[in-house]
Image: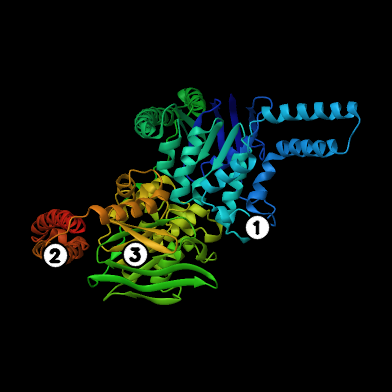
Amino acid sequence: MYSVQKINLYFGSLHLLDDVGFTISPGEKVALLGRNGAGKTTLFKILNGELSPDGGEIVIPKNSRIGYLSQHFDLDESKGILESCMECFGDYLAIEHQIQERNILLTTVTDEDKVNKILNEIAELEIQKSTSEVSNPEAEASKILKGFGFRTEQLSEPINTLSGGWKMRVQMSKLLLSKPDLLLLDEPDNHLDIEALIWFEKYLKAYTGALLFITHDEQFMSNVADRVIELSNRRVHVYNMNYRRYLGEKDLRKEKELQAYKNQQKVIKDKERTITRFMAKESKTKMAQSMKKQLDKMQRIEIETEDQTHLNIQFKTVGAPGKVVVTTKELYKSYGDLSVLEKIDLEILRGQKVAFVGQNGQGKSTLVKIIAGVTPSSKGSAELGYNVDLKYFAQNQSDVLDVKKTVLETIEDEADPEYKTACRKTLGAFAFSGDDVYKKVSVLSGGERSRLAMACLVSQKSNFLILDEPTNHLDLASKRMLKQAIIDYPGTLIIVSHDREILKGSVDITYEFRDRKVIQHLGDLEYVLEKRKSDDLRSFELSNKSQKSDKKKTKPKLSYEENKKINRRISKLEKEITKLESEISGINEKLIDPAFYNSPDAAPALKDLKAKETRMEEATEEWEEWVSKLEG
């Protein structure tokens, strides 16, 4: 049992942790939740012994080992990937080395007593080896490295050839191979793509040690956590339940806290009025002073400051592009001898919302950079359609902000002219309120910079958005707000993300990047996984090949007349869908103006919009059915 008892921590006058206490039992999987800045990572450092609290204690069972995923690399980068991981088996490998030494010695010794002595030593070492938890270190290390996405041929490569994200995977592999009794993971999902994340979830569920983890990935929490500990207002609230049940219980707790807070505030105000009245009378001054002392000693109920990120935001739209928004033809991209993309042909149409998924390093970000005009292709073309107004949110968007500017200056400089007056309201939606808007960018945390970068994007007009890993450093509330904004955006959108919650229900088409190619799936990520009857994206390729093979064998041939009839219907539906898209876009353009709602045309327009959206859904479903029939 790991016990955290009445932990207090101050940073100057800031009381960050107040009598924080909870327990973790062996084998438990616990999610630690809380807003950015609540003190989650600080609590991890106290548990790991990096930071000493100002009060309280951590009680850890004797001989227990704690493993902490540091955000700083602790690797000899000249070593190979597998070689570095094998360092975790020092004791086992030392025994093997001693056995080898004695076996070599046996070939040179002839004295019977010495031979027997060496054989006894080998037997004892073999017993030690057999009682070890390890049976095949190299196979165990390879299994975890492959789970994190490394290929067999990569394992001998030196670590210094890897990017930061892949180095972190090596570090995570070493942490898992060391098999600590308590595993502390601080946002491990930041470094993993969907494939690795799905594998990692399964591994952690089967992990025999205890786990305490911080994440902003709701799917990850739902799949892994048995319990939830929420850090709020310097204290913790413990929920002995999974994440989905916690969400409902949290709402009930907040309602009760709010009611108790309101009741106490009423009592306080009544007492303050009485004290003020008594202070004015000399005969009752002492009584008033006594009442004031009692009031000052009252334990005040605190409620969490209401998060402004519950407000709705909208990506601003401008104009209507042509039917085809972007086309790539015979597109290739390589960096020296390294080929990243080969013969990419894709077409994205007006209004489509597209997800790019796949392992890190497969070319997702490279392709969006080419489409956005940031990076040239090596061969082939990527062309934007008629009247396309593109805005691009890069992975490192928050890193390119001018650190000398204030938050308000930053958004005012980025916002389109007509939205400059609404900058403070937009910042409020991203949890920058009051004097926060005058903070310099240089003092902002990673999460705050990400929110500011997103606020700048919201203040600009577009009809085509590209979002490359937009959820990095965003907390749960901000991500929910972003997802709704994506769903509501009437323009065309490409999102590169490994966040399954963001992708679920927010995109129409998923492009999987693999082996320098892209594979199109008509649906969001959840639909694709369900369609493949698989929990692992790695089976996509095999499944696709199998289905193509089956189609060759079993696909019935359509007659010329049937083909003609189906294609005619598909063409008719596509024209209708295009027309509906244009009409819906036109109505939405009117609805952007608040003054329009006061006109007599508002009610009919809203009714017309609903009817057209309903018909749009019906026509799209029918189109998918006819396309499926055509494909067999």
Which numbered tag is attached to residue 567? Answer: 2
Q: Earlier in the sequence, mark 3 or mark 1?
A: 1
Tell me if residue 257 can be seen: yes
Q: Quadrant of the N terminus?
A: top right
The one of 32 and 80 positioned closer to us in this rendering: 80
Most foreground residue, 338 or 239 = 338
Of residues 613 and 276, the one drawn nearer to the viewer in this rendering: 613
- At label 2, the amino acid type is Asn
- State which quarter of the image contains the C terminus: bottom left
Q: Which mark is residue 465?
A: 3
Q: Residues within 10 Å of mark 3 (few under 14, many from 20)?
A: many
Q: Residues within 10 Å of mark 1 (few under 14, many from 20)?
A: some
Say whether residue 27 is left or right of residue 465. Answer: right
Pointer 1 residue: 158
- Vertical position of residue 426 compared to residue 374: above or below: above
The residue positioned 56% from the left and 47% from the top of the image is 145
> Which residue appears at 26% of the width and 69% of the height?
318
Looking at the picture, does residue 146 appear above or below residue 2?
below
Query: CB under 8 Å between callouts 3 and 1?
Result: no
